[in-house]
Structure formats: structure tokens, C-alpha cells
């Protein structure tokens, strides 16, 4: 009986020790590093270059912006200079207007520039954007 009592006391002490012991420190989760906008593995800075170009267009067309964004009419005027058919420009718009608000902000317009240049250079427009083509701020 004394042995059973000692065993029960040892079990109680073990449970108490576990309950009162300090939890192990777990490292705080670190934010995942922002994924770069990798439009072209051979030109890793292309995304930043196009964003800079889009910013320049936004400044040049500042008087025509709606809510700080480019309207379809302004984008059509700019992108029609590529010589692409309007049906292709419409498809570019559909792909580039990621948030589907009917306007293009700087990252979306940079994407539109990229897509137009690809088509001008002989590439086909994708049916759906590959995740790496989506500007990081829109993911």
C-alpha cells in the first residue's frame, strides 16, 4: 500500500511539474521575404524598370487620371502606339486589370506594357496570368 501511495505521489508531482514548467520558447515567425517581380529570368530588373516607366506615364497623364489610375481610354491611346489590334489591347486590359476595377494603377499598367511588348515580339498572350507575372503588390 505504501508503495502504491508513493507511486501516486510521484505521478502527481510529475503532472504538477509539467503544468508549471516554462513552455519552450518558439521563435517568432518571420515574414516571408517579398517575392520579386520576376518577369524575365534573363533580365531580373525588368519588373522595376517597367514600374518606373509606368510611373512616368502616370505623371505625364496626371490630368487624365481617375482616382489616381489610368482609364481605359487613356490606356488605349498609349498602347495603340504599339500597332497591336484593338482586340489584342482589350485582351491585354483584361489580363492587366487584376483587381477588375475598370482602371489600371501603376503595377497593372506596368504589366500591360510588358504584355504588349511580348506580343509585339511574337509571343502569344496567356489565357491566364502565371502567378509570377502578377505584380507582388497584387498577389
Image (spheres, helix red, strand yellow):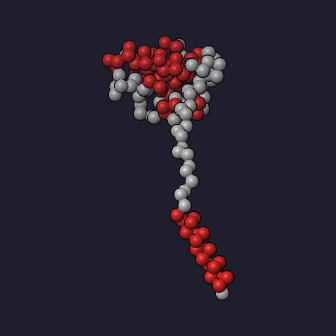
Name the quadrant containing residue 4: bottom right
Q: Residue furthest bottom?
A: 1
Residue at the image position 55 percent from the left and 34 percent from the top: 33
Q: Residue furthest front?
A: 2
Please name whichever residue, 106 or 19, is drawn nearer the observer in this view of the structure.
Answer: 19
Q: Is residue 82 visible?
A: yes
Residue 78 locus on image (x, y percent): 45, 15
- Relative vertical location of residue 90 with respect to residue 59 in this rendering, above or below: below
Residue at the image position 60 percent from the left and 21 percent from the top: 44
Residue at the image position 32 percent from the left and 17 percent from the top: 63
- Relative vertical location of residue 3 with respect to residue 130 in this rendering, above or below: below
Residue at the image position 36 percent from the left and 25 percent from the top: 68
Residue 10 locus on image (x, y percent): 62, 74
Please name whichever residue, 97 or 60, is drawn nearer the observer in this view of the structure.
Answer: 60
Q: Which part of the image, by quadrant, shows the N terminus?
A: bottom right
Q: Is residue 77 visible?
A: no
Name the quadrant containing residue 37: top right
3 to the left or right of 129: right
Q: Residue furthest left?
A: 63
- Relative vertical location of residue 67 with respect to residue 76 in this rendering, above or below: below
Residue 49 locus on image (x, y percent): 52, 17
Q: How many marks?
A: 0
Residue 18 locus on image (x, y percent): 57, 65
Amino acid at each position: 500500500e505504501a508503495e502504491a501511495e508513493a507511486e501516486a505521489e510521484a505521478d502527481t508531482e510529475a503532472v504538477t511539474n509539467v503544468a508549471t514548467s516554462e513552455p519552450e520558447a518558439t521563435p517568432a515567425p518571420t515574414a516571408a521575404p517579398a517575392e520579386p517581380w520576376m518577369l524575365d529570368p534573363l533580365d531580373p530588373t525588368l519588373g522595376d524598370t517597367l514600374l518606373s516607366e509606368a510611373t512616368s506615364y502616370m505623371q505625364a497623364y496626371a490630368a487624365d487620371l481617375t482616382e489616381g489610375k489610368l482609364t481605359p481610354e487613356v490606356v488605349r491611346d498609349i498602347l495603340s502606339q504599339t500597332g497591336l489590334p484593338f482586340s489584342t489591347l482589350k485582351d491585354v486590359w483584361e489580363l492587366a486589370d487584376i483587381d477588375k476595377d475598370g482602371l489600371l494603377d501603376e503595377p497593372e499598367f506596368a504589366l500591360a506594357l510588358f504584355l504588349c511588348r511580348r506580343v509585339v515580339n511574337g509571343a502569344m498572350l496567356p489565357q491566364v496570368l502565371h502567378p509570377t507575372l502578377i505584380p507582388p503588390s497584387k498577389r
